[in-house]
Amino acid sequence: MNFLSDTTAPAHPALLDALVETNEGFAPSYGADAVSAGVKQRLQDIFETELEVVFTVSGTASNALALSVLCPPDAMVLCHDEAHIHRDERGAPEFFTKGGKLLPLAGDHARISPDALADALKQWPSDFVHATPPAVLSLSQLNESGCAYTLDELDNLIGQAKARDLKIHMDGARFSNALVTLGCTPAEMTWKAGVDILSLGATKNGALASEAVILFPSVKDHLPRLQAHQKRAGLMLPKMRFVSAQMGAWLEDGLWLELARSANDAARRLSEGLAALDGAALVHPTQGNEVFIRLEEALATRLRDAGAGFYSWPDGSARFVTSWCTTDAEIGALLEAAG
């Protein structure tokens, strides 16, 4: 009954098979191989546009590299106070931007409030020498409370940011989970909405270690600088084809969406079951594969004693995360232990 994180889940067999297949023979280094080129073409087909891409092995690396080409050292990134780049990346964005500031904003369920964004844009001008000018708006999709911005919410926030000439970064560590929740296309949730650069994560949804920084047409010319930062940071792997091969298998025939849908469905069943218990109350709506719920201490202890793994969130709630391979039997065992 492991609900600690989707990063604790095993890799999907199809992605491991892709690694074995890619291990035949020799190939050019550092992403100049046919496998990586093929995945780039697949991404262009999926996102319905020309794009550039670099592959990485962690979400922190993807976010930091993406922000390093969008935010100058004397500017700042606007994000939610709960954003991963603010709470969980040990200053990597500031380090990679060589001093760029993060300004955390408020909003229920880890979604930036339009009023909070408007207030920040008003308080921080771009033409006052004493103020740090905003350069980037970073949005997490799914966000850190397991919630998704709707297309209308994205339109509101991105519209405000674009009116001030900000670039838009999307942290998509759980992008596929948000996508199946909203039922829209990848294009509609990204570049058509005004997103300039996307950190696309596969690791939380079936990969061994595979992430991508996707540059949409508005910032395609940033690729040489992004590659230079990637190389200088030691994040440009010599055998990059083994990273891109995982993503290729993940995207093939809609597997990435199938796995996300399975994880989301499991979270919904778990959320409904936990919320029906005495001594339990949901903290956030379950819109992906994460369940945040307050548990009375006796109930939490009973679950842990039964072998259930879940994370104690800083706000006092419990976080349960389902994965592509979470089974009905695991959910049933958890709920039985709770009862």
Image (cartoon, rainbow, N blue to C red):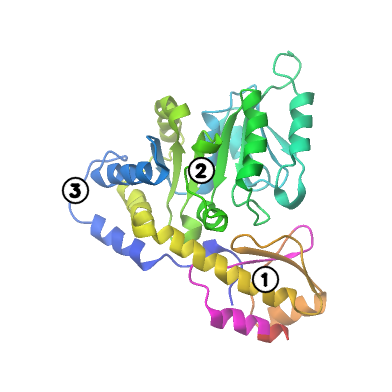
* Tag 3: amino acid: Phe
Judge left or right: residue 243 versus residue 146.
Answer: left
Q: Which residue is mark 3?
A: 26
> Distance between the Cα atoms at labels 3 and 2?
38 Å
Q: Which residues are magenta?
A: 314-335
Q: Which of the image's four quarters has the N terminus?
A: bottom right
> Distance between the Cα atoms at labels 1 and 3?
48 Å
Residue 222: percent from the left, percent from the top?
44, 26
Q: Residue at x 42, y 28 (%)?
A: 220
Q: Which residue is mark 1?
A: 271
Q: Is residue 90 visible?
A: no
Q: Is residue 10 magenta?
A: no
Contact check, label 3 and label 2, Cβ < 8 Å: no
Judged from the image, the secondary structure of the residue bearing numbered disc 3 is loop
* Tag 2: amino acid: Glu
Which numbered mark, 2 or 1, is in the foreground of this view? Answer: 2
Q: Quadrant of residue 133?
A: top right
